[in-house]
Amino acid sequence: MSHRIAVDPLNQDEEQAMDQPTLMEDRRLSGDTVQIGAYTPVPGFGVLPVNAFLIKADQPVLIDTGLAALREGFLEALAAEIDPADLRWIWLTHTDPDHLGNLAAVLERSPNARLVTTFLGMGKLGLHGLPVDRAYLLNPGQSLDVGDRLLTAVAPPSFDAPETTAVFDGRRRALFSADCFGALMPAPAETAADLPAAGLTEGLQTWAAVDAPWLQWVAEPAFRQRLDDVRALQAEAVYGSHLPPARGMADTLLQTLDASRNAPAFIGPDQADLERMMAQAGVA
Ligand SMILES: [Fe+2]
Ligand SMILES: [Fe+2]
């Protein structure tokens, strides 16, 4: 069954279309940082990366917990990298389902791990019926000492949930940027640099319009200050939840996000569009 629809800005090749969430092989980002990545199909737009990360610091840290639909594979991938009992921190960037998908399962297997979130994040987790008794609250600007480095909570310039904290690893100069700098893509890619420049720009801007529609209403001076704050981190690598690993691309990503404020607004298909799409796909 094809999910291809009329809205197809990235010209997804129907033959290569991914029709369900798919886990990728673990990817070593540096000596001690691993990406546990997946892609999920977005009908009409291609695919969206959904990444979690493991930092094998003195006190190991898992950043986000992947998609519930891929639970078995996610837990296997994690266990292949580390004994879950050794995990000391689970840093939840925010409480969206693509980030907390396997949180309860990881908490259960990792009794020595504390859950890093914010006060609002803790409240939302409680509303989800998830355990909050192991929460450790960290606000933007505050740091977590994980033995061999500090991990600093950063308020990213774009986000879709107010509790969001990005993570800056000062030792590796790596920014785990949460939903900021995500990109819709025609097909999976090893690195962000593997995408053609125009395709990357379009994918970043479409994602920004979908994920942070409020960007178009933000005044330039205030937003530029937020971008400058991130630029000042001098991140050598940006590891987005929804972007392939991006090395040496922080300025490009910041400039593209700035320009996204003037990109066309995203308006999703309405019911008539949906019925037309389903008829085209032969499922009506
Ligand atoms: Fe999100
Ligand atoms: Fe997300």
Image (spheres, rainbow, N blue to C red):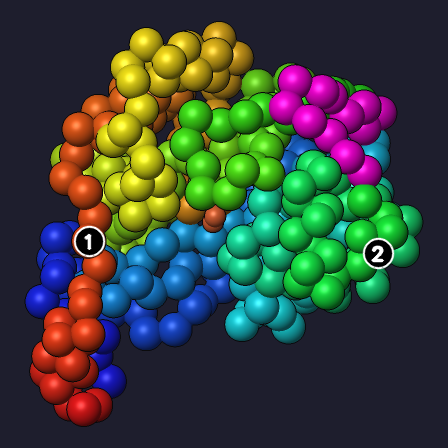
> Sequence-wise, which precedes: disc 2 or disc 1?
2
Measured as percent of width and height from the top left, residue 273 is found at 13, 72
Measured as percent of width and height from the top left, residue 7 is found at 12, 61
Residue at the image position 63 percent from the left and 24 percent from the top:
140
Q: Is residue 84 magenta?
A: no
- Is 58 situated left or right of 248 in this image? right
- The kind of residue on which mark 2 rests is Ser
Where is the N terminus found, in terms of image quarters? bottom left
Q: Which residue is mark 2?
A: 110
Of the two numbered discs 2 and 1 in the rendering, the one whose residue sits closer to the viewer? 1
- The kind of residue on which mark 1 rests is Ile
Residue at the image position 60 percent from the left and 51 percent from the top:
95
- Is 273 situated left or right of 146 in this image? left
Measured as percent of width and height from the top left, residue 9 is found at 12, 53
Badge 1 element: loop
Quadrant of residue 264 within the rendered picture: top left
Q: Which residue is mark 1?
A: 267
Q: Is residue 140 magenta?
A: yes
Q: Which residues are magenta?
A: 136-147
Residue at the image position 62 percent from the left and 56 percent from the top:
100
